[in-house]
Image (spheres, rainbow, N blue to C red):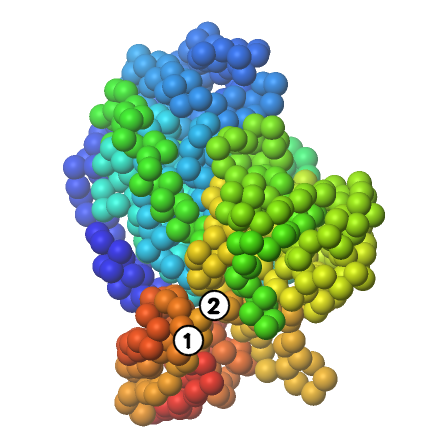
């Protein structure tokens, strides 16, 4: 399927009910699943539902071995415990990316061993390739999801999916724990950057395009691989902002904001779903029958299998105190709808589930159901036919073409937020002081899940990619001086930075965050480290023009600095090509086109999304972020005009056609994303002041104008009504693009 077809299919989201009817037809895959199931012992079935960490089958010091598999341990896992899946990179002494040949050796040993088992059922190897093949050395590492969202370019997301799948497969791996379809509406949360931002529609389109690029039309193709939607559902909205803490999401909000991303992922064909590691409304994700079975399967029509997150079944006992014993925890999770357990360090799940099945406490029908779902995906992805890695390395891994796509993604991901008096682009002869903790590190542009889990091991980063400082040095003939100024939270030499600033034309001040993910990234405030503010204040004191550049996964509060800076460039996590792309923008070799996929808060508690309720902007309440959702400047100017919505009246269930002109009124070629918002003016449930319903990114020459056409379907006009079901209510609506707004009405039937 080409990208146009992908987008059409994604934009035709229909009400959930229509997804329901599709029962799997009896197919060769189905026949193979049933035939295999009929031959399996209970032990073999329970084993299929068990996923272990690679360290369980690894030699003690796997880091140095060419093939760290401990064959005796692997034999035990496969022949005695019949494990269905293995995950992760060699973890002894610490997890990190491995050479591709080593991965091919590891996965070959596993393939060969599984082929010697009684029923020759292949093991499915899962990996967190969340912005590229994280754990394969020298893979192409893209902007993280928050930055891919800032591109507003589904074609790039589709291509990223294609490339990541190829590199995963060339590594001998089978299955990618990506994309994250959680919606990022809590900026403190240390995984905000793993999401496509705060907007549902943007996440649906970008995530859907990634999945379709990754899986293609046939997941069994050598260069395609299955994805896994994470982390179902509500994980991204912890009340206190800390990872793996409770969310309190009412059913209406869940259905309006948090489920649709997963619905889009299911529709795009993702065959697996990983479960929310925390809890919503008092019920841990892994024990939530209503979400895992009634909604995911009953309503969204998901036919694949669910996998627990890390150790989360046993945590129903050890952490959540829901289950009185580990045994009860296993029963609870399996009966709620968990099909595979990421145990991951032992066979306790296998032993306990076997016992529960033998005693009849977990019915065999439930085990058969879970195993059939897992086997189905193994057949659909061609694992039974694979005797060696699906792809060779040459021509499929880190190709020049893939690197070029990555560079383009990084360029389109960067957001120019402020540019007073055309401070940027900089002249290539200006003398520049570069200072600040994010100026000379690759890790700050890549974030977590890069080479290591936390992404912070700078010494392991490939040297061929430039940091921001190095990229600036390569571009300009002007004098460039670097003074670190400080580490993230300790001063090194602020005074020296100030002295050097006096001697240069301009200061590039690079601030932000170090890499992190999960609980290790928890913070207590969005405020910047005080010492970064101190450096900024000291620099501003001398009155030199400052270009503020930020990198990091969350919008840390920069209001005071942004006010004084002449230009502000928000980098977020643009990946390995981030330094080069940012320098391209600073010097004007690339015209910026990124737009914010989140509202950038003005103050630490100023957390209001763009699609807020009227009451959040009423009387003294305001939506007044530092930069709004969708904000992003260019070196040229664009104007939209002539917004038209037809017809002016429709029946509920019908669509309207929207058209609008967009013109480049400046002097440079550039790309603009036109955003189409909708507002339901009065309804039985309070409606957001506006919601993004369509967008398109176009490139325009100076003076060039294009007319863009969009269809807004009943789905776009619908919301979760009083009875918790989707409804389109008669009444008035308005469509908004730029400064224009055009009404239409839905008539009573
Ligand atoms: C994370 C998941 C990840 C899994 C496997 C968990 O801790 O929450 O996102 O896929 O580990 O590495």
The quarter holding residue 84 reads: top left
Residue 228 on image: x %, y %: 41, 43
Q: Residue at x 55, y 63 (%)?
A: 424
Residue 169 on image: x %, y %: 33, 31
Relative to 476, does residue 614 appear above or below in the rendering? below
Relative to 41, does residue 285 appear above or below in the rendering? below
Q: Is mark 1 within 8 Å of ligand 1?
A: no
Residue 428 on image: x %, y %: 53, 54
Figure quadrant of the C terminus: bottom left
Would you say 735 lies left or right of 508 here?
left
Give the CA distance from mark 1 to mark 2: 10 Å
Mark number displayed over residue 634? 2
Relative depth, front residue between 653 and 680: 680
Relative depth, front residue between 252 and 662: 662
Q: Residue at x 71, y 67 (%)?
A: 564
The quarter holding residue 175 reads: top left
Relative to 483, does residue 650 appear above or below in the rendering? below
Q: Is residue 253 visible?
A: no
Q: Tell me the element at label 2.
A: loop
Q: Tell me the element at label 1.
A: loop
Q: Residue at x 23, y 42 (%)?
A: 218
Relative depth, front residue between 524 and 602: 602
Asked if the residue at tag 2 contacts the one at tag 1, i.e. Cβ–Cβ closer than 8 Å, the answer is yes
Relative depth, front residue between 597 and 566: 566
Q: Is residue 629 visible?
A: yes
Residue at the spot of label 1: 666
């Amino acid at each position: 399927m080409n990208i146009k077809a992908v987008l059409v299919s994604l934009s035709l989201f229909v009400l959930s009910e229509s997804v329901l009817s599709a029962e799997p037809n009896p197919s060769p895959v189905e026949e193979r699943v049933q035939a295999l199931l009929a031959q399996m012992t209970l032990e073999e079935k329970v084993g299929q539902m068990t996923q272990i960490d690679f360290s369980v089958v690894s030699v003690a010091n796997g880091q140095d071995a060419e093939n760290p598999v401990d064959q005796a341990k692997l034999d035990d896992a496969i022949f005695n415990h019949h494990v269905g899946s293995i995950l992760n990179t060699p973890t002894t002494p610490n997890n990190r990316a491995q050479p591709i040949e080593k991965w091919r050796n590891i996965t070959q040993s596993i393939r060969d061993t599984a082929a010697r088992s009684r029923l020759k059922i292949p093991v499915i190897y899962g990996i967190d390739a969340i912005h590229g093949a994280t754990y394969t050395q020298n893979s192409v590492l893209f902007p993280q999801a928050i930055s891919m969202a800032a591109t507003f370019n589904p074609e790039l997301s589709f291509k990223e999916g294609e490339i990541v799948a190829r590199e995963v497969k060339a590594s001998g791996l089978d299955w990618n724990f990506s994309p994250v379809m959680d919606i990022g509406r809590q900026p403190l949360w240390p995984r905000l950057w793993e999401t496509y931002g705060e907007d549902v529609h943007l996440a649906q389109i970008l995530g859907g395009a990634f999945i379709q690029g990754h899986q293609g039309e046939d997941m069994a193709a050598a260069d395609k691989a299955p994805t896994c939607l994470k982390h179902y559902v509500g994980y991204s909205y912890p009340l206190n902002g800390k990872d793996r803490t409770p969310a309190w999401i009412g059913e209406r909000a869940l259905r309006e904001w948090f489920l649709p991303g997963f619905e889009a992922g299911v529709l795009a064909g993702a065959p697996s779903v990983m479960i929310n590691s925390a809890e919503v409304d008092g019920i841990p994700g892994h024990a939530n029958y209503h979400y895992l079975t009634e909604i995911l399967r009953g309503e969204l029509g998901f036919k694949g299998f669910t996998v627990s997150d890390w150790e989360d079944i046993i945590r129903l006992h050890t952490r959540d105190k829901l289950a009185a014993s580990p045994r009860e925890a296993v029963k609870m999770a399996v009966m709620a709808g968990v099909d595979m357990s990421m145990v991951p360090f032992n066979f306790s799940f296998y032993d306990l589930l076997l016992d529960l099945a033998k005693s009849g406490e977990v019915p065999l029908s439930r085990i058969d159901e879970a195993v059939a779902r897992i086997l189905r995906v193994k057949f659909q992805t061609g694992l039974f036919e694979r005797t060696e890695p699906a792809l060779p390395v040459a021509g499929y891994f880190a190709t020049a073409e893939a690197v070029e796509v990555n560079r383009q993604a990084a360029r389109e991901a960067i957001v120019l937020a402020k540019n007073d008096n055309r401070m940027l682009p900089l002249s290539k002869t200006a003398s520049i002081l570069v200072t600040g903790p994010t100026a000379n590190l690759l890790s700050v542009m890549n974030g977590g899940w890069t080479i290591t889990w936390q992404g912070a091991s700078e010494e392991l980063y490939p040297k061929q990619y430039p940091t921001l400082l190095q990229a600036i040095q390569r571009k300009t003939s002007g004098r460039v001086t670097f003074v670190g100024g400080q580490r993230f939270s300790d001063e090194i030499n602020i005074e020296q930075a100030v002295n050097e600033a006096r001697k240069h034309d301009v200061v590039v001040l690079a601030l932000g965050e170090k890499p992190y993910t999960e609980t290790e990234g928890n913070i207590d405030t969005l405020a910047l480290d005080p010492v970064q503010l101190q450096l900024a204040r000291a620099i501003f004191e001398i009155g030199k023009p400052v270009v503020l550049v930020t990198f990091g996964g969350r919008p840390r509060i920069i209001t005071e600095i942004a006010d004084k800076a002449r230009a502000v460039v928000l980098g977020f996590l643009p990946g390995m090509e981030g330094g080069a792309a940012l320098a391209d923008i600073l010097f004007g070799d690339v015209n910026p086109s990124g737009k914010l996929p989140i509202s950038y808060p003005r103050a630490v508690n100023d957390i209001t999304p763009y699609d807020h309720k009227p009451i959040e902007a009423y009387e003294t309440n305001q939506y007044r972020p530092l930069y709004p959702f969708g904000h992003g400047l260019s070196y040229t100017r664009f104007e939209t005009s002539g917004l038209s919505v037809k017809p002016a009246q429709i029946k509920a269930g019908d669509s309207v056609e929207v058209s609008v002109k967009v013109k480049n009124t400046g002097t440079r070629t550039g790309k603009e994303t036109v955003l189409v918002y909708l507002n339901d003016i009065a309804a039985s449930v309070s409606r957001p002041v506006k919601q993004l319903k369509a967008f398109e990114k176009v490139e325009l020459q100076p003076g060039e104008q294009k007319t863009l056409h969009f269809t807004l379907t009943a789905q776009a006009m619908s919301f979760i009504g009083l009875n918790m079901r989707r409804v389109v209510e008669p009444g008035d609506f308005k469509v908004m693009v730029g400064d224009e707004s055009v009404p239409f009405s839905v008539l009573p039937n």
